[in-house]
Image: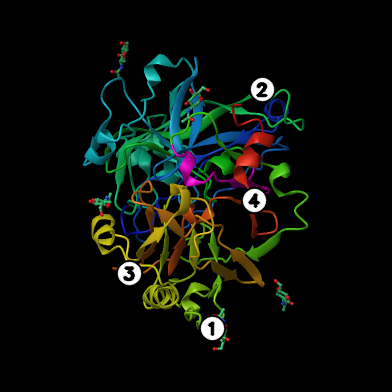
Amino acid sequence: MAAVPNFFFAIIVSFLCFSPSHAAELKNHIPTVILGLSHAKAILPTPKSTSYSKTKPSEMQDMMEPLREIRDGYLISLNIGTPTQVIQVYMDTGSDLTWVPCGNLSFTCIECDDYKNSNTMAASFSPSSSSSSLRDSCSSPSCIDIHSSDNYYDPCIIAGCSLSTLLKSTCSRPCPSFAYTYGEGIVTGILTQDTLRVHGSSSNPSGGTNVFREIPRFRFGCVGTTYREPLGIAGFGKGHLSLPSQLGFLQKGFSHCFLPFKFANNPNISSPLVLGDQAISSKDQMQFTPMLKCPMFPNFYYIGLEAITLTNINTSSPEVPVSLREFDSNGNGGMLIDSGTTYTHLPEPLYTNLLNALESMITYPRAKEVETRSGFDLCYRIPCLNNNALEDNDGLPSITFHFLNNLSLPLPQGNSFYPMNAPANASVVKCLLFQSMDDYEGGPAGVFGSFQQQNMEVVYDLEKERIGFQPTDCTLAAASHGLAKV
Ligand SMILES: *[C@@H]1O[C@H](CO)[C@@H](O)[C@H](O)[C@H]1NC(C)=O
Ligand SMILES: *[C@@H]1O[C@H](CO)[C@@H](O)[C@H](O)[C@H]1NC(C)=O
Ligand SMILES: *[C@@H]1O[C@H](CO)[C@@H](O)[C@H](O)[C@H]1NC(C)=O
Ligand SMILES: *[C@@H]1O[C@H](CO)[C@@H](O)[C@H](O)[C@H]1NC(C)=O
Ligand SMILES: *[C@@H]1O[C@H](CO)[C@@H](O)[C@H](O)[C@H]1NC(C)=O
């Protein structure tokens, strides 16, 4: 896992014109489940903010998609094209663009050996096999948006349109290919539109779950070559090209309940991902923290961390800097909540102070050799009775995050210390799965990653601009949405 936060920076705008008849088609709730995200994004230069007139799609019904968990993140299945091709991509709240590996045999990922070895390379989308696939034109708002950060030229000039067609805005040449940069990765491709099919969310969870709704002219990147990005990505940011934005959920919201890590690569159960009213309604019991407006990266989700406390009240809590809840004059700061970053990243010296506080409380022997091998900084060898103490109370301290608005979130067991191997010799090694924001060069001061969001319902209430957390058994939540095979 890269130490950089998963942070994606291109801003893409898409305009959606849902006609009333299309809106009527989108009547069903789509259950969404996503599991396993593993890629790293980088922090990029400030994008220009673009303002396009926003066409608000009329009433959308909720949708619900299952998310499959893999080693480092959560995957959503995209059903694209005619006939439908199914492509699994990361669900990523830290970026906007949705892209899929594209081409018959030609998708190339440079420096992806780790992924090739672990067999996570995904299927490619073949636009030539889809009768509804179209290339976006150079004058479309989405084309202008995806090119807004790389230069100030009209994409139609790059596309070679004649002056007379430019003046009349009638040039219909294809949108030139784009490059989109993540923390460590880059993807290049062409902007494509095609039909996307999503699952309607039935209000009756046990019946009628497989109703598909068609979203015509969904805009996504058809990507031929990447650097360190082995799988496609579905962007869940607030930009106009993001998936919630294109589907009309930007004024509402979405929620997910990530299954615990032990279900990674298990095909029999998926995490629920819900978009629409159902995701944000009836949450009166839930604690919410405000979404902070990040001047530098307005399309992503920021929250404010006020304090971290540990179970042992005799240990003084590490002091949390104001940068985790405020932005400086350059727009740096805040805590990014990002499903595309695996582990939570904390700034120095908070990270080191937290390790020291934990170390002073824990009496188990350190497992230094595992620390060296894994790259995690705090590992302990914990005796287990019955060789089966993976889930049981292990006597390790629990960690509580306190977010703005007096929201206390005790991290569920398994979200901080996690077993690195099966029990052997009646002991198991558990490591703290947090990382330091080393090499900080601006951007968010910290990142709340997907690993620390397991077994909790996370609600992105975009209407009220707040994020809610509720510790939840996501295995039960999956079953109640019909996402667990019995
Ligand atoms: C993909 O394969 C189909 C069928 O083999 C072929 O007709 C088409 O030209 C190919 N497209 C590309 C982009 O290679
Ligand atoms: C999934 O279910 C099948 C059929 O019940 C079973 O054989 C398989 O072991 C299960 N896989 C996992 C990872 O639990
Ligand atoms: C905290 O310190 C007090 C006084 O030293 C001691 O009596 C108490 O047991 C300690 N509590 C914990 C949880 O360690
Ligand atoms: C904050 O929440 C705690 C319980 O979680 C409660 O006891 C306390 O009164 C709250 N403080 C404020 C200022 O609302
Ligand atoms: C278990 O203990 C035995 C004897 O102390 C030792 O030889 C062996 O290497 C240990 N196994 C592991 C996996 O630590």
Q: Element at badge 4? A: loop
Say which amino acid is labelled 2.
Val
Residue linked to disc 3: 440
Q: Quadrant of residue 275?
A: top right
Q: Which mark is residue 211?
A: 2
Residue 193 tag number: none
Task: Please give the name of the residue rendered at 65% of the width and 68% of the height, measured from the top-left corner.
Answer: 407
125 relative position to 308: left or right: left
Query: Which residue is the site of mark 1?
Result: 314
Mark 4 to mark 1 CA distance (whole Å):
28 Å
Residue at which label 4 appears:
472
Label 2, ligand 2: CB separation under 8 Å: no
Foreground residue, 116 or 195?
A: 116
Q: Mark 4: few, some, or many residues within 10 Å (few <14, many ≥20)?
A: some
Q: Is residue 389 visible?
A: no
User: In whole angstroms, how far apart are the C-alphas of marks 3 and 4?
Assistant: 33 Å
Circle 3 crowding by C-alpha within 10 Å: few under 14, some 14–19, many from 20? some
Q: Earlier in the sequence, mark 4 or mark 1?
A: 1
Mark 1 CB lies closer than 8 A to ligand 3: yes
Residue 231 shows in this picture: yes
Report how far apart the C-alphas of labels 2 and 3 lie in the structure.
Answer: 46 Å
